[in-house]
Amino acid sequence: MHCPDFRTAISARVDGEELPPDLSGTALAAHLRGCADCRRWEERAYRLKKLTAGLF
């Protein structure tokens, strides 16, 4: 798997959705431990969700 696959899973998690069927939470956590770019992407996704939560 590549970062775009993990970012799809991160997006699902941020939105409270199920992870893609081919990706476990354990695999996602392992990737995040080793990938600073995806950790930053996840942080920005959560920040964006928080900032927009009151707008809709």
Image (tube, rainbow, N blue to C red):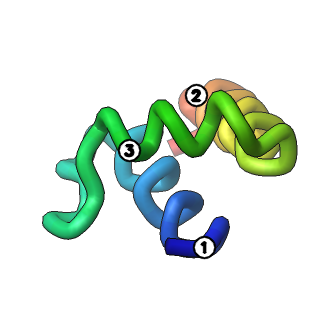
Comes first in the chain, label 3 or label 2: 3
Q: Could you tell me residue 35's position as x and y percent?
A: 76, 44
Comes first in the chain, label 2 or label 1: 1
Residue drawn at (30%, 37%), measured in percent from left and top?
25
Residue drawn at (37%, 53%), measured in percent from left and top?
12
Q: Is residue 44 left or right of residue 9?
A: right
Q: Could you tell me residue 38's position as x and y percent?
A: 73, 48
Q: Could you tell me residue 56's position as x and y percent?
A: 50, 44
Look at the image and tell me whether residue 48 can be seen: no
Which residue in the structure is indicated by mark 2?
54
Residue drawn at (84%, 39%), measured in percent from left and top?
36
Marks 3 and 2 close (CB-CB < 8 Å): no
Q: Is residue 20 above or below residue 18?
A: below
The amino acid type, in three-letter code, at marker 1 is: His
> Which element type, helix, strand or loop, lies under badge 1?
loop
Q: Could you tell me residue 46's position as x and y percent?
A: 63, 31
> Which element type, helix, strand or loop, lies under badge 2?
helix
Q: Residues within 10 Å of mark 2 (few under 14, many from 20)?
A: few
Q: Nearer the viewer, residue 1 or 16?
A: 1
- Corner quadrant of residue 27: top left
> Which element type, helix, strand or loop, lies under badge 3?
helix
The amino acid type, in three-letter code, at marker 2 is: Gly
The amino acid type, in three-letter code, at marker 3 is: Ala
Q: CA distance from mark 2 to mark 1?
A: 33 Å
Q: Nearer the viewer, residue 17 or 25?
A: 25
Which residue in the structure is indicated by mark 3?
27
Q: Nearer the viewer, mark 2 or mark 1?
A: 1
Q: Is residue 44 above or below residue 54?
A: below
Which residue in the structure is indicated by mark 1?
2
Q: Is residue 7 above or below residue 10?
A: below
Residue drawn at (74%, 31%), measured in percent from left and top?
43
